[in-house]
Each structure stands twice: as structure tokens, then as C-alpha cells.
Amino acid sequence: KIQFIISVKRTDRNLTLIMNRVLSMITGYSLILMAILAGFSYGYVFTKFYKPNSPDLVQADFLGNQELYMWMVIGFICIVLLDFLISWTILKLFKKENPQLAFITSLLRFLYTVIFFRAIIFLKNNIELSNKHGLEINQNFEYFLYTWSIGLILFGIHLILLALILKKHQYIPKFIWYLMLIAGISYLATNSMKIFVPGKYDTANLLENILALPMVLGELCFAFWLIFKRKMTIKALTK
């Protein structure tokens, strides 16, 4: 009977570890896919269309590349769906270690994603414009960027709290939560400047360019650890 109980407990433990492994894989691959989609939709396509001081060029680019614009919007929507998924997986992965902090961290990402989705609607509105005038297109671009910056303030706080969770995790290398903390502070600082100190918008953009690498590396290093290193950790624990 005792052996049976021990066997059942060991099976439950292994099932929990397997579930954590699945959640880790989902989170890791989702983060990497999001980075690729963001590179395409924002890094390549949006910067191609966004010319705040040249509405005539914006109009010409938009009319000549409407299919590419549609793919940009689809890419952003895919990012939203992945962000909702990650909000859930992060809660599942870390709720046993720190349930309150995991819930708040997950909730902040969820709220950020809702705001980001609202921002994307401004991009969609350009498709529905009747005259496709460059000034109106640019106005929707500005609304998109402003709304997204509001969301990114919450996203920055989310990353800071996630870094605190990772700090307490015995298997996560220190440099990962350091990068996550730097990324969170960077998002919070630069986007707070854009929203609350309008005169410093150019300074915020300069800081954003300087801090771009750690802002990207924070989540990407976390993603690769979830996929590869956590797999090794779980294998060791199940032996």
C-alpha cells in the first residue's frame, strides 16, 4: 500500500513536470514567433509607411502597397493572440511559486494586450477610409502609436514583475532576469516620457534606440531558456 501511494505521488509529480514542460514550450515558441512578427509588422512594414512629415508620400505608399499593409495588420493581430496566450501560460507556470505576483504579472500583460488591440483598430481604420488622404492616414498612425505607448507602460511594469519572479527561481541564470528587469525599466521610462512629457518625445525615441537591444534580448533569452534549458532541468528532476 505504501509503495502504491509513493508510486501515485511520483506519477502526479511527473505529470505536473510534463505539463510545465508543455507550458514552457508554448510560452517560449510564442515569444520567438512574436519577435519575428513584430520585426515584420512594425520593424519593416510600419516604418515603411510611417512618414509623419510627408503625407503625400504616405498616401502614395499606402495606395501602392495595400496588400502589404493588410499583412502588417494581420501580423499585429497574430501578436495580440499570442500575447493573450502568454498571459495565461505565465500565470500557469509561476502561480505555485508566487500566486499573487504571478496573477498581477499575468493581468498586466492581459491589460496591455487589450490596449494594444485597441491601437491596432486605428491601423484598420485606414483601410476603411473613403478618400485615403495622407493626412488622415498619418493621424491614425499617430493614434496607434500613442495608444500603444500607453499599453507599453503596463507592459514595462509586467516585465519588471516578471523579472522579480525569475529572480526567485533557482534554475534561471541571473543574466536573464537582469535583462528582463532592464527591458521592463526601459519600456516604462521611454513610453512614460512619450505620454507624460510630450516635449521629450525625440529624447524618448533616442533612448528607445539605444536600449533596443536589451529590450529585445530580455524576452528572447527567457524564451530560449524555456525551450532548451528548462527541458534539461525537467529531465534531471524526473530521473
Image (cartoon, rainbow, N blue to C red):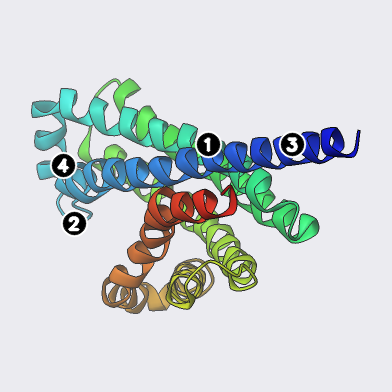
**Residue situated in front as seen by the camera: 232 or 126:** 232
Q: Mark 2 or 4 closer to N-term?
A: 2
Name the residue beneath numbered marker 3: 12
Q: Is residue 196 above or below residue 100?
A: below
Q: CA distance from mark 2 to mark 1?
A: 47 Å
Residue tagged 4: 58
Amino acid type, residue under disc 1 in the picture: Val
Label 4 crowd (10 A; few <14 / some 14-19 / many >=20): many
Query: Does label 1 or label 3 sit earlier along the sequence?
Result: 3
Point out residue 46 in the picture as x, y percentages from the top left corner: 23, 45
Using a 10 Å C-alpha cutoff, classify the residue at mark 1 as few (fewer than 14 neighbours), some (14 to 19) or many (20 or more): some
Q: Are marks 1 and 3 in contact (CB under 8 Å)?
A: no
**Of callouts 2 and 1, which one flags the residue occurring earlier in the amino acid sequence?**
1
Find the distance from the CA under tag 2 to the CA under tag 3. 61 Å
Quick check: can you spot residue 139?
Answer: no
Query: In the image as oriented, which residue stretches furthest toward the right?
Result: 1
Asked whether 132 or 67 is in front, the reply is 67
Amino acid beneath label 4 = Val
What residue does disc 2 label?
53
Disc number lying in front (4 or 3): 3
For badge 2, the amino acid type reads: Asn
